[in-house]
Image (cartoon, helix red, strand yellow):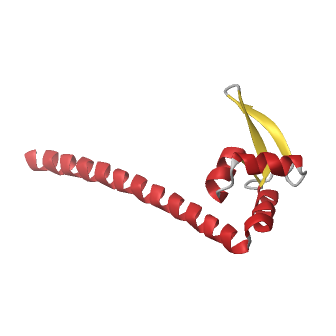
Amino acid sequence: MWTKKGASLSDKNARKEYGITQEEIVEGIHQEKLQFRVNYIHGNPYYKLLRREVENLMIEKYGNAHLEKQKLVAHLAKITTEIRSLKRKVKKLEKEKLSIETQLNNL
């Protein structure tokens, strides 16, 4: 499970995606409801958790409706970020297009 794409996530991403607190993560680890691995990035440690176990903990603690709401909120945030990125790319391409059209008109 640890190596499958999307099957694991960092504690930071779990907090962002599921609205879980660091205290709830540590409590879940102590209660042995969450398996974890300690990984390091640039010398800084973080917990790597199994997504399915985080979801089960959220369902147990807050119910299925809360989990679904958090998933939708996270998905909406990803979509919003992607839209902003695409708008910046379109703006850049429109400037480039205008520059090329100006060069063509000057020839």
Measuring from the top left, give residue 53's x and y in whole percent. Answer: 82, 58
Residue 26: quadrant of the picture? top right
Residue lying at 67% horizontally and 69% vertically, measured from the top left: 66
Q: Which quadrant would the N terminus be assigned to in this image?
A: bottom right
Look at 77% across and 41% down and name the residue there.
Answer: 47
In the current view of this chain or complex, which residue is farthest to the left?
Answer: 106
Can residue 2 be seen in this snapshot? no
**Residue under the image location 62 percent in, 52 percent down:** 16
In the visual, does 12 lie left or right of 81?
right
Q: Is residue 33 left or right of residue 39?
A: right
Which is nearer the eye, 13 or 90?
A: 13
Q: State whether residue 60 appears in this view.
A: yes
How far across and how far down the image is residue 41, in percent? 69, 31
Q: Residue furthest bottom?
A: 65
* Position in image of residue 69 (x %, y %): 62, 70
Image position, residue 95 (x, y; %): 24, 49
Q: Residue at x 66, y 58 (%)?
A: 18
User: Residue 22, relative to residue 79: is it above or below?
Assistant: above
Instruction: Name above or below for residue 64 compared with residue 21.
Output: below
Q: Return the residue nearer the eye: 65 or 74.
A: 65
Q: Residue furthest right?
A: 32
Count of numbered marks: 0
Q: Dividing the image into 4 quarters, which one contains the C terminus?
A: top left
What is the residue that sits farthest to the top in this orientation? 43
